[in-house]
Image (cartoon, rainbow, N blue to C red):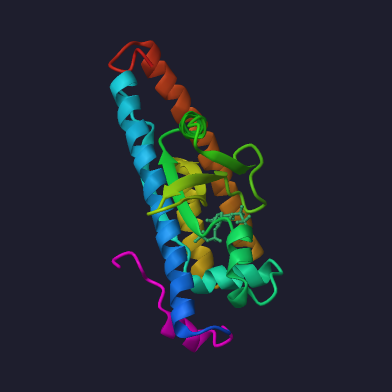
Amino acid sequence: MGFRYYYADRIREKMPGFRGTDEELQSAIDDISLLYNSAIKEVETRLDILSDDFDKKHSYMPIHHVQSRLKTFESIIEKATRYGIEDPLNNLDMVRREILDIAGIRVVCNYEEDLLTMSGLLLSQEDIEMIRVKDYCDNPKESGYRSMHVVVAVPVYLVNKRKMVPVEIQFRSVMMDAWASLEHELRYKNKGQLAQEIVDTLKECAENLHEMDERMSRVRHEVLKTGNKYSDY
Ligand code: 0O2
């Protein structure tokens, strides 16, 4: 199976606590790989179609780029432990109910206003269920982080059943994404520890970029008003 990248023997080495056989562990993790990789494909395809249709109708593509990732098995188990799930390796059904970002998609839009357009279009699809929204655009995190996190459940059609699978979608503007990517790298390089002065500077940078986001959006609207190929949007 091309999509499988969790291996039972490697997981056994790092986490020896699984009580079943290797075959049972492999089957459980294949199930996770298949479901969540499929859910990512499903959402990516829907976003692609929406983007193409939006372009056709308005001569404008709100999405700058899309990234996706499947959480590693180790970090799923680590997060489950952090969330207080007892013996997560032997309670994978509970882990799948509680950990909602096993499948993650980042939709980077041009401007902040595009976030609502794209999330609204996706959420209005009748077979998509909204699980939760965390709006860090209007309420940025203490670090300065801005983004809109939407968890949806999407249908995945298997051979003889349909499964609703949760996917966390982070909608960000280009400016929000630039800040988050650089800040994440700096934090990661320093193993999560940054001096207070650096933290303050990064927060200030986030605020400056937010201001820039708003200015760029105003410029865009000026350009639209003067009439050009986007004038019907
Ligand atoms: P990855 O690989 O990016 O997904 P948690 O805090 O994870 O226990 P929850 O509810 O998932 O619980 O947290 P939250 O804060 O809603 O979303 C976590 C994700 O948002 C992070 O994923 C980052 O992608 C992003 N994020 C949140 N805060 C910040 C921040 O201050 N800086 C940056 N750069 N990104 C942030 P992970 O878990 O880091 O991993």
Image label count: 0
Residue 210 occupies quadrant: top right
Query: Considering depth in this image, is 84 or 208 the residue closer to the camera?
Result: 84
Does the image show residue 103? yes
Please give the name of the residue rendered at 51% of the width and 41% of the height, measured from the top-left corner. Answer: 209
In the image, is residue 7 part of the stretch drawn in magenta? yes
Q: In which quarter of the image is ligand 1?
A: bottom right
Q: Position of residue 164 (x, y in %)?
A: 52, 49
Q: Is residue 31 left or right of residue 17?
A: left
Q: Is residue 224 above or below residue 16?
A: above
- Residue occupying image coordinates x 42% and y 42%: 108
Q: The magenta stretch spans which residues?
A: 1-18
Residue 1 lies, with reference to residue 57, above or below; the image says below
Q: Residue at x 38, y 31 (%)?
A: 62
Query: Could you tell me if residue 69 is visible in this image?
Result: no
Q: Who's the residue at 40% across and 57% down the image?
A: 37
- Which quadrant holds residue 129? top right
Residue 15 locus on image (x, y percent) = 54, 84
**Residue 107, image x, y percentages:** 43, 43
